[in-house]
Amino acid sequence: MLHNKNVSCSSRSGLVLKITDDKIAVNIINMAACAACHASIVCTAFEQKEKIVYVPNTGQQVRAGDEVEVKMQTSMGLTAVMLAYLLPLAVVVVLLIVLSAANIEEYLAGTLALSSLGLYYLVIYLIRNKLKKQFSFYIETRK
């Protein structure tokens, strides 16, 4: 996969742990600058102290122990936030409004609206492999 250098990306330093034929395991190094980042409130991909990210192996010239930059397009991060937080909220609110307008009792409308979250996240789970292809990381060697 070729990556456009002009596209805005989120990146973190990482250390290559393991290389297989199809993927490279990279341990993300926790950076103190994350606390000052304006997107730190919504960033979940790198929020844990130790995070292992699997990057597709496309023949990069890296070895275990190499320090690399793990990157993802910023637009993909925003899409992930939309799928994980904004869209489910919209589903619940719209369903609650529609059910209330249909004169469904409040407790039942609330229960059905909240239950729709389970169905929403089940669909997300079922299409996870397709989403993994869209939300892939890539690496660049550090100079």
Image (cartoon, grey):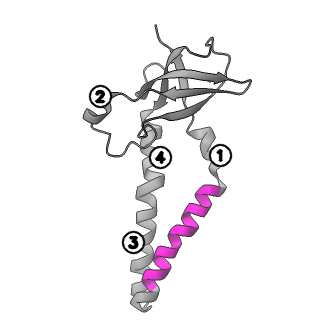
Q: Which residue is mark 1?
A: 130
Mark sitting earlier along the chain (3/2)? 2
Marks 1 and 3, how far apart in space? 27 Å
Work out whether mark 2 precedes mark 4 in sequence or the reverse, and give the earlier one: 2
Residue 2 seen in this snapshot: no
Q: Residues within 10 Å of mark 4 (few under 14, many from 20)?
A: some
Residue 39 higher or lower than 86, as above or below: above
On whether residue 117 falls in the magenta region, the answer is yes
Kindly report the distance in space between the C-alpha atoms of the residues bearing marks 3 and 4: 20 Å
List the residue tagged with mark 3. Answer: 93
Q: Nearer the viewer, mark 3 or mark 2?
A: 2
**Location of the N terminus (image quadrant):** top right
Name the residue: 50% across, 80% down.
Answer: 112
Tell us which disc is closer to us: 2 or 1.
Answer: 2
Is 82 or 45 nearer to us in this picture?
Answer: 45
Q: Determine the CA span between mark 4 and mark 1.
A: 13 Å
Would you say the residues marked 4 and 1 are in contact, meaning their CB atoms lie under 8 Å apart?
A: no
Residue with the mark numbered 4: 80
Q: Earlier in the sequence, mark 4 or mark 1?
A: 4
Residue type, numbered disc 1: Lys
Q: Is residue 112 visible?
A: yes
- At 46% across and 74% down in the image, what residue appears? 114
Instruction: Sort mark 1 into few (<14), some (14-19) or many (20+) by Cα contacts within 10 Å.
Output: few
The residues colored magenta run: 109-125
Q: Is residue 26 left or right of residue 142?
A: right
Instruction: Give the dominant element type of the magenta stretch: helix, strand or loop.
Output: helix
Residue 59 horizontal/vertical position (percent): 68, 16
Mark 2 and mark 1 lie on one chain; the one further toward the N terminus is 2
Amino acid under disc 3: Val
- In the picture, measured across the screen, residue 70 lies left or right of residue 57, that is left
SS of the residue under disc 3: helix
